[in-house]
Image (cartoon, grey):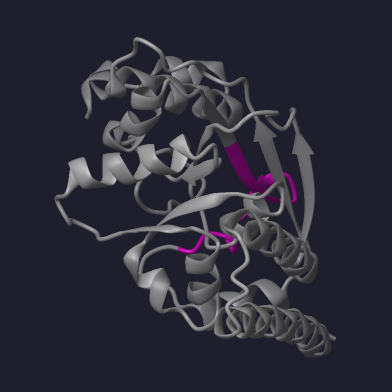
Amino acid sequence: MPKLRVFARLARLCLVLLLGLCLASLIALGERLGLNASVARRQRWTCLFMKRLVAALPFEVRVSGELPQRPMLWVSNHVSWTDIPLLGMLLPLSFLSKAEVRHWPLAGWLAEKAGTLFIRRGGGDSQRLREQIGEQLGLARPLLIFPEGTTTDGRQLRTFHGRLLAGAIDRGMAVQPVAIQYLRSGEADPIAPFIGDDDLVSHLLRLFAEPRGQVHIQLLQPIGSVGKERAALAFQAQQAIHLALFGVEEVEQLPRRQARAA
């Protein structure tokens, strides 16, 4: 039975990827004919693709909170590569992603066409990154970042990097904190996290071999950025997400030194 389940889920995923390939081909054909689709339109198409992709993943998804009615800088904790389609299905978004994603087959190309900003690990060009984020927000395009800088096992929250929020302060744009939580039998899901040296194929096979897990996406109260220091803004967003994920007592135990982290 597990093998049959894995095969059925893989077959459904392949159909979705075929849809993505057709979408990519359509965009490429339009470019060759000089009919370039706007970024906003490509983002809408990508959002539809994300919805189809999430439907093919073994998750039951629950979303609480209200979608913002104006562009904001979205900040979320980061557990897995699946965070991207799960959040990207909510509304047309741009993402800040590690540079390696640009070279992923199909997904990297679609991400680039949807307006993804790519960052090199340890690139050291904080000012350029700040300008890129500010430019994206200045075009009234919502942008999602993972300010931890890497994935976790979902049982902890790493320090948020304040430099990634500087662009929101420059533009006076509010921050939309998002808490994403993977659960299995009421506990933190040990299968969903994509960490360390894990590879995409092995991770997919593990996910597909198990019954459906649960995902809870919480859209928290937006945070104003006007007049705030970037480290304080990052800490405030981190505290809100930590509270949503783990509760009041653990939030109060967060080291105050994190408020000084840049």
Q: Is residue 185 above or below residue 26?
A: above
Q: Residue furthest front?
A: 34
User: Which of the 4 quarters of the picture holds residue 56?
Assistant: bottom right
70, 161: nearer the viewer: 70
Residue located at (57% from left, 58% from top): 39
Task: Answer yes or no: is residue 234 visible.
Answer: no
248, 71: nearer the viewer: 71
- Residue 3 is situated, as x and y percent measured from the top left of the image, at 77, 89
- Residue 226 is situated, as x and y percent measured from the top left of the image, at 40, 13
Q: Residue furthest top?
A: 227
Residue located at (50% from left, 83% from top): 105
- Residue 47 is situated, as x and y percent measured from the top left of the image, at 70, 58
User: Which of the 4 quarters of the picture holds residue 69?
Assistant: top right
92, 51: nearer the viewer: 92
- Residue 177 is situated, as x and y percent measured from the top left of the image, at 54, 30
User: Which of the 4 quarters of the picture holds residue 218?
Assistant: top right
Q: Is residue 191 shown in magenta?
A: yes
Q: Is residue 85 above or below residue 239?
A: below
- How many numbered markers are drawn? 0
Q: Residue furthest left?
A: 124
Task: Answer yes or no: is residue 183 visible.
Answer: yes
82, 7: nearer the viewer: 82
The answer to whether 27 appears left or right of 151 in the picture is right
Q: Is residue 38 shown in magenta?
A: no
Q: Is residue 38 above or below residue 219?
A: below
The answer to whether 211 appears left or right of 241 in the picture is right
Residue located at (30% from left, 36% from top): 161
Image quadrant holding the N terminus, namely bottom right
Region in magenta: 179-194
Image quadrant holding the C terminus, namely top left
